[in-house]
Image: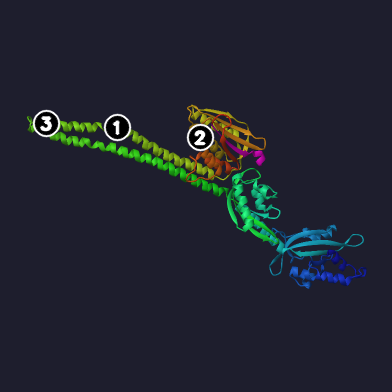
Amino acid sequence: MLWCATEATADPAQTDRPDLLTRVLEVSPVGIVVVEPSGEITTANERATEILGLERGEITDRTYDHPEWHIFYEDGTPIPESEHPVTRVLETGEPVLGFEHWIELPDGSRRWLSSHSAPVLDDDGTVERVVVGLDDATALKRREERLQWMIENETLADVGGWELDLETETVEGTVGMRRLHGDDSYSQSFEELLEYYHPEDRAEIRAAAERCRDTGEGFELEVRRRTAEGTQRWVRLSGERVSDGDSPVIRGVVRDITVSKEREQRLTVMNRMLRHNIRNKLNVVLGHADRLGRELGRLDFPARLEAKQQELLAVLEEATNASETLQSEVELLEQLLREASGFRIEEARASAREIQTASEDLYSLAETARKFDRAVRQEPSTETVDVDDVVTEVWERYTERYETATLALDSTDATITGNRVAIRLAVEILVENAVEHTDTADPTVSLSVEETGDGRVRIRVDDDGPGIPHQEFEVLERGTETQIVHSSGLGLWTVQWLTRRLGGEFAVHDREEGRGTSVELLFTAAETAA
């Protein structure tokens, strides 16, 4: 089109088809203006008048750098004359193509233009004219802005879109899907996609997709998904069948619900644990309080003894020879003394101690739950943490606290990106659980740190205790508790939450050699994370 404009602006004597080129110029879908070396605009076609919102005469009355041309970059910065594409063509003799900018029209509206400026050269290479092609790309710009807005919303909402082609069984993903996946490329087969989901969830996903394909029934599932980096996340996966031309597809959304899922888990676990422990402790308090009350009820005998003593003295004064009456009063006195001896002071003290202990346990439980919850709620930190330093501090503290336990330390210099307080708390919980939940008088706990060789750091705690019941493994693996199946404490849950909040992996299993349990925390090394 620029070629046509160039030919149309050339000397008519050099052109065999001036009328045709002029007609082509007028019906061109692209706005075209011709600028002289002086800066004057000599030609503008009909499409140019539509794009610029001016009559043809108003356009040709201006120069290309007239101040009434309000043109500016995307960020609102006015385009200086030195950067104007026509100026650059006049100075260099080289075309400037694909120059995009905003222009404010006389009515105050704005249009996004894409311009292409090319020189018309004479025989010695001097610029005779500059032909400018103008294209109104406002609609395209608005679509780009809307797409960017959708991408930003996907990021804010932790949402990604996906589409399954039912003929090729290929899955494509949006930018948000690629971000959730942790990989810039997201085009794979349905079976390859299933490999990223937890083995226990794959059958449910496959069945839901097949029902959607066969019957059109939509689905919404809460499942566990592994990112390209190996981190497990909870996601809400939904999809529905739609027709894309002649090819049916399933389109859906994946939303990361890890934070809300873990919040739900925390509420469930803490509610169950607090309800269970508070009920048990209150039963202890009430039982011992009742027992103490019964014992204290025996303490009214001194008043009864004093009244009977006065009665006895009166009898002795009035009837010294009434042996039967005297005998009955002596018997009464003996009865009162037996009642006094029936008060068990040590049992009362023991009940008071039990009440005090149960109350202190309840207070400690509340403080522990508050401490754990506060740690889990903290936003993940980006500080570099010296893992060897943290683990050594824990080892020194608990070696001093538990004199009968043997704590072994095998650590190496390693750093990760995370929250120092949260990592230390997780290690403390594991060491404390290993020492206290044992059936031996002198337990052995091994604490180690190692680099795995694939850019990650492993923190491991081994013990020689009775091991964790299978029920505990099942609950921690599933990530949910029920009325029938639940774990016994808050510690391992807290370690799991803290680890996942920091982007790490949590694993617990029986030791390969001997009895006991191994708990592993796996984090990305700081150098790799950077």
> Quick check: is 406 in the magenta stretch?
no
Say which quarter of the image contains residue 329: top left
Q: Which residue is mark 3?
A: 326
Query: How many numbered badges does the structure rendering display?
Result: 3
Residue range in magenta is 516-530
Which numbered disc covers residue 433?
2
Q: Are marks 1 and 2 in contact (CB under 8 Å)?
A: no
Could you tell me how far apart the alpha carbons at marks 1 and 2 are, in whole angstroms? 37 Å
State which tag comes first along the sequence, 1 or 3. 3
Q: Residue placed at 45% from the left, 40% from the top?
A: 365
Between residues 277 and 16, which one lies in front from this camera angle? 277
Q: Is residue 232 visible?
A: yes
Quadrant of image for the C terminus: top right
Image location of residue 303, percent across then percent down:
20, 37
Q: Residue placed at 10% from the left, 34% from the top?
A: 314
Quadrant of image for the N terminus: bottom right
Could you tell me how far apart the alpha carbons at marks 2 and 3 are, in whole angstroms? 69 Å
Image location of residue 470, percent across then percent down:
52, 38
Could you tell me how far apart the alpha carbons at marks 1 and 3 are, in whole angstroms? 32 Å
Q: Which residue is mark 1?
A: 345
Task: Using residue 503 as the reference point, say whether residue 300 is left or right of it.
Answer: left
Q: Are marks 1 and 3 in contact (CB under 8 Å)?
A: no
How dense is the environment of label 3, judged by Cα within 10 Å: few (below 14), some, or many (20 and up)? some
State which tag comes first along the sequence, 2 or 3. 3
Say which amino acid is labelled 2.
Answer: Asn
Between residues 74 and 348, which one lies in front from this camera angle? 348
